[in-house]
């Protein structure tokens, strides 16, 4: 059985991780929103740029220790394309945190655009293309 101090340490570590993940998600959403507003498609090259900018955010780095920051770094042995092709993960659900947050931001923007198009032009909603490419 775990000692009370081990349990509290684990709970504190989990809380710190959740806080850092929420912080990083907010940063990624903010970065992605700039590109979404300009209707820039989510390409592999852009995804890498979003990742680099988010992980280099000085506020994020100052709010969390180096060990925590390392948990959000994509492993070097987990390569992804660096092309201008649209992002597609297929059926994979194992994504680096920044990639997942950016994809979710783009998906939400797509859903909102589709809902808006359906409300404004119901007849066109069936042919509505992905607003952000891909």
Image (cartoon, rainbow, N blue to C red):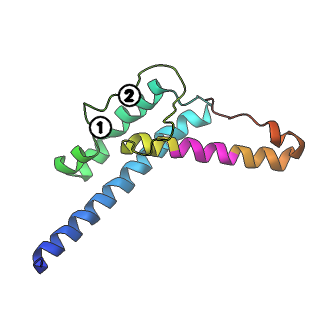
Q: Where is residue 16 in the image (x, y as percent from the top left)?
A: 26, 61
Q: Is residue 4 left or right of residue 93?
A: left
Dot 2, how many residues are within 10 Å of its Cα: few (below 14), some (14-19), or many (20+)?
few
Q: Position of residue 98 (x, y in %)?
A: 39, 42
Extreme residue toward the top, this view = 83
Quarter placement of the N terminus? bottom left
Q: Judging from the image, what secondary structure is the residue with disc 2 in?
A: loop
Whole-number angstrom distance, CA of label 1 to CA of label 2: 10 Å
Q: In this view, does 4 lie to the left or right of 29?
A: left
Q: Who's the residue at 51% across and 30% down the image? A: 87
Query: Which quadrant holds residue 94?
Result: top left
Q: Do the residues labelled 1 and 2 touch (CB within 8 Å)?
A: yes
Q: What mark, if any, has residue 34 been given in the picture?
A: none
Q: Nearer the viewer, residue 119 or 61?
A: 119
Q: Judging from the image, what secondary structure is the residue with disc 1 in?
A: loop
Q: What mark, if any, has residue 74 been given in the picture?
A: 1
Q: Who's the residue at 68% across and 35% down the image? A: 130
Query: Which quadrant holds residue 134?
Result: top right
Identify the residue position indicated by label 2 in the image: 80
Stretch in magenta: 104-112
Q: Position of residue 56 (x, y in %)?
A: 30, 36
Q: In this view, does 2 lie to the left or right of 122?
A: left
User: 39 above or below 102?
Assistant: above
Q: Who's the residue at 81% across and 47% down the image? A: 118
Q: Is residue 80 left or right of residue 12?
A: right
Q: Does the magenta stretch include residue 105?
A: yes
**Prevailing SS of the magenta stretch:** helix
Q: Position of residue 6 (x, y in %)?
A: 12, 72
User: 11 above or below 120?
Assistant: below
Query: Which quadrant holds residue 39?
Result: top right
Extreme residue toward the right, this view = 123
N-term-proximal mark, 1 vs 2: 1
């Amino acid at each position: 059985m775990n000692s009370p101090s081990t349990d509290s340490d684990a709970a504190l570590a989990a809380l710190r991780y959740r806080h850092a993940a929420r912080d990083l998600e907010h940063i990624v959403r903010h970065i992605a929103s700039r590109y979404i507003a300009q209707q820039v498609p989510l390409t592999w090259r852009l995804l890498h740029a979003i990742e680099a900018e988010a992980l280099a955010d000085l506020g994020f780095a100052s709010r969390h220790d180096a060990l925590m920051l390392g948990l959000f770094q994509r492993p070097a042995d987990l390569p992804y394309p660096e092309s201008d092709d649209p992002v597609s993960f297929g059926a994979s659900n194992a994504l680096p945190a920044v990639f997942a947050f950016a994809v979710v931001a783009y998906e939400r923007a797509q859903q909102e655009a589709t809902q808006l198009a359906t409300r404004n032009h119901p007849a066109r909603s069936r042919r509505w293309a992905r607003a952000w490419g891909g």
